[in-house]
Structures are given as C-alpha cells and as structure tokens.
Image (cartoon, rainbow, N blue to C red):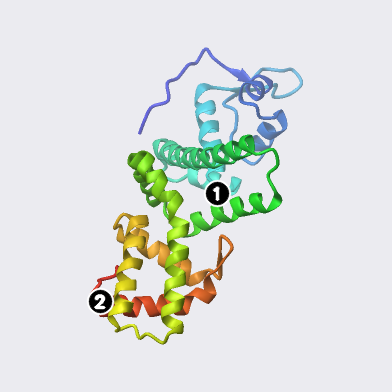
Amino acid sequence: MPRIPADPGRFWRVGELAERTGLTVRTLHHYDAIGLLRPTGRTSSAHGSGHRLYTAADVARLQQILSLKMLGFSLEQVREYLGRADYDPRQVVRLHLARVRGQAAELKRLEDRLAALSDALEKAEVVSADEFLTTIEEMTMIEKYYTTEQLESLARRREEAGEAGEELFRQGPQQWAEFQASLRAAMDAGIEPTDPRAQELARRWFALVSGFTGGDPGLFLSLKRMYQNEDTIHGMDVAAMRPGMEWIEKAAAAAGIQLPGA
C-alpha cells in the first residue's frame, strides 16, 4: 500500500480547500456531515469546535472520492468502497486513468470527424441540412458496425495508397453502380446462380468487396452485418438489394469462393 507523505505543518481551512479544488464549501461540509471526508483537525475556539482543518491525507482521500464519483460511483458506494479492507488507492487512480484515456481517444475521433466537416464547410458557401444529416447518419452508422481498429485500418490503407488510392476511392461508387446494374440484369434474365455468367459476376463482386476490406475478414463481416440489418444506407435502398445479395452469395459458393463466416 502506498504511503501518503505526512506534512504535520500544513493544513487547509475549508475555504482554502474549496478554492484550490474548485469545489464549494457546501460540498465539503456535506462530505463531512455524511462521514465521507471528515477533516482531521479543527481550530480551537471558545465558542465550539472551530474551523475545519484538512491535512495532506485528507486531500489525498478527497482525490480518491472525486475519482470514484467520476467513475460513476454514488456517494454511498464511494464511502463503502473506501472502507473496504482491500481498498487500494492505486487501483482507483488506474481505473480513472483508463477512463480518461478512453475519453481522450473518443475526443480525438470526434476531432477528426469535425475537422472533415469543417473542411466541407470551408469549401462550400452553403451546406444543406441534408448534408449535415448525411454526416450524422454516416457517423452513427460507422460507429454501430465498425470497431475503432477497423476504421483506423481503413484510414491507414487509404493514406498509404496515396493518389492512386484516392482515385480508386472516387471510382468506387461508379463501380458499385455498374455492378448492381449487371446483377439486376442477370436476375431479370432468369440466370441461375450456378451459371458461369453468375459465377463471373460473383468474382467481380468479391473483387470489389476485397478492394474495400483489404481482405480483412473482420471488415467483411462488419460490412455484411450492416447490409443485413439496415434498410437504408447513405440513401441506398438496401432492403431492395437483399435478394440480389443472396443470389450473389449463392453464385460465389458455386464459383468456389470461400467467404468469411461461411
């Protein structure tokens, strides 16, 4: 157990401690009243117990109380936790540190998204409500189906690919639109998934998907879950596309393409 260095010559009155910590005197009085943080000493007074005096050990306990509160503990839970025989202040600091680091990572991701939106605003005189809604939709959709590691992997691959990667990224929507048109034409013509023409379409589809996922099976499954669970994605009617996706997966199986999770 770490030792809190004693400083018998240093005391803080309640007002001083409130000013240093940003807490209110009322809050410190409340912590005293409920037995959560009782000051070690008091000034002498002819009319009573005098003013509260807090020591370095009291300050250390106050830090633990505030960390536990920020971790979601109620005041009653904080008091119970600090009274446990196995209580270790190091563990509280480690838990709080992990929480703060997680929040920092979330803020960094939010910073990146807002930077992208800021860039869009700088380039256009007017950004429509639909564009803001699309941005929100993309943010929530991405977080729903892709892990942080997967998003970082996608960003890293795009960055490493340089200008060639940017060009492929821009061509992606057109390539998918052309593929969907070919898929609808094959289904309308009554072509069976076992037909060699269907299998060729399946290879084309798998190449497009692999280009996006980089061959990562986890990304493939995340993408598949999104298309299975959402009816609309970025304005596309995904529900209407599901029969085609079932057809193409059967054609992929006939072509001997091993899909992740199959």
Residue at the spot of label 1 = 77
* Above/below status of 59 relative to 163: above
- Return the residue found at the far right: 47
Label 2 SS? loop
Residue drawn at (45%, 49%), measured in percent from left and top? Answer: 170
Q: 190 or 135: nearer the eye?
A: 190
Residue 102 position, x and y percent, is: 46, 42
Quarter of the N terminus within the rendering: top left
Q: Which amino acid type is shown beneath numbered disc 2? A: Ala
Quarter of the C terminus within the rendering: bottom left
Q: Which badge, 2 or 1, is on the more N-terminal residue? A: 1
Q: Which amino acid type is shown beneath numbered disc 1? A: Gln
Query: Along the horizontal axis of the image, is 92 left or right of 249?
Result: right
* Above/below status of 227 relative to 195: above
Residue 43 position, x and y percent, is: 66, 18
Instruction: Residue 255: give its label.
Output: 2
